[in-house]
Amino acid sequence: MNTRHGINWARAQALAQRERQAFVEAMPKSRALSERAARHLLFGVPLHWMNDWSTPFSLYVDEARGASFTDADGHRYADFCLGDTGAMFGHSPPPVARALATQAARGLTTMLPGEDAAWVGEELARRFGLPYWQFAMTASDANRFALRWARAATGRKQIVIFNGCYHGTVDDVFVDLVDGKAAQRGSLIGQVHDLLEATRVIEFNDLAALENALKDGDVACVLAEPALTNIGMVLPEPDYWRQARALMRRYGTLLAIDETHTISCGPGGYTQAHGLEPDLFVLGKPVGGGFPCAVYGFSAELAERAQRAKRDAPPGHSGIGTTLTANMLAMSAIRATLAEVMTDTAYAHMFALAERIESGLRQVIARHGLGWCVTRVGARSEFQFAPQPPRNGTEAGRQLDPELEQIVHLYLLNRGVLITPFHNMILVCPGTSLHDVERLVGAFDECLGELV
């Protein structure tokens, strides 16, 4: 029998064909909209990666609220993707929707601050422990700007990233380790610059590799997620961050922490929960309750160095920021999210349900005799096709199986449960119910029953 990750592969292929046909038959309106969009949208979708789902054509959404959404054909789904963290606190949280509606009638963008900006700055400093802040439209931009400030403040051009990291569409980070050697990622289309000139890539959880990358004193900044989240979840080993932070301080290298995904760890993110003390802190998608915006914070020492670098630079555009950055609408969304949505109560609810998902998935996997594991960081869980959680990006990459993932994802979707379209990330929000979790675990159990 031909097996793959413990799965009967012939049976898996037959199941995939059946599920694709079931999707086609159930989605006439989505199919019609896809055909209509294909006439004028590149790749037939507003953004090309909207084709990354397991479906034969795009699923079109009619309405999304809380922990669920309804498609164009009237089917309702329990949403465990939640915009890949963009809607980590649910779709259209009522406080955010109200704030946006109120602010929309009072002004959208002026390129000047309002009172919300002062409140938001104070709350960000209180919550995350960094005293100074700036804003961006996306986490990708915030990471770009953070790297620019780090290089300007230190006078160094090199950065260090971790193999398998995710920091949005920042060109500098599209570098992988291939057979132990740094290589620019082939999927980065249209890039004409040699990223290897200023980017060093190492494995996560490898302190010796980190020291080797830093010891020449040329590295401005280590840009890192507290845990890798986009190649399959990779958690830091015990005491890794304490020792890594000591190495960075020894060699005068800044730490920029990107919490866009790991904000699932609590109201202050992984940083506050584990005392990381970064020099720069980036948070995107969730901080505006799903409205496009991002924030990035500076330690007091780095803020002084960054401001001095700007004062000492020639006059003119810094290359940092866009016209719509920190607009009044975004500030109202951030304020409402921080004040009324990202609460201790919300996280307590999310953690309890994520723990239930973690234990439920493990029980199902064990019952079907599969050598898979489940990893969780706060409200974020993931099942992985390996017996033990991976410790670095290379190990995580080896266990990925996009074809198998898409079979499982489509099976779940056809039963009203949506998870993230790449790898196997599952997220809960304040509106997620125990019933939603039971639907997910039950559908996953049925899927494995048909595959094994």
Image (spheres, rainbow, N blue to C red):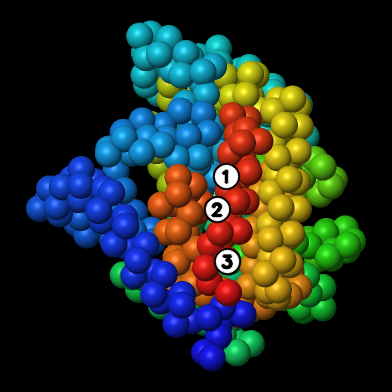
Looking at this view, is 232 or 137 the one in front? 232
Q: Which residue is mark 2?
A: 443
Q: Which residue is mark 3?
A: 449
Which corner quadrant of the image does residue 328 belong to?
A: top left
Say if 126 sits above or below 95 in the image: below
> Which is closer to the viewer, label 3 or label 1?
3
| Residue 211, horizontal then vertical, whole percent | 80, 74
Outermost residue, left direction? Answer: 39
Verify CB contact (< 8 Å) between mark 1 and mark 2: yes
Q: Secondary structure at mark 2?
A: helix
Of label 3 and label 1, which has the lower sequence position? 1
Gap between marks 3 and 1 measured at Cα: 15 Å
Q: Amino acid at mark 2?
A: Ala
Q: Amino acid at mark 3?
A: Gly
What residue is shown at x 52% (from left), y 89% (from top)? 2
Say if 435 sits above or below 357 in the image: above
| Quarter the N terminus occupies | bottom right
Q: Which residue is mark 1?
A: 439
> Which is closer to the viewer, label 2 or label 3?
3
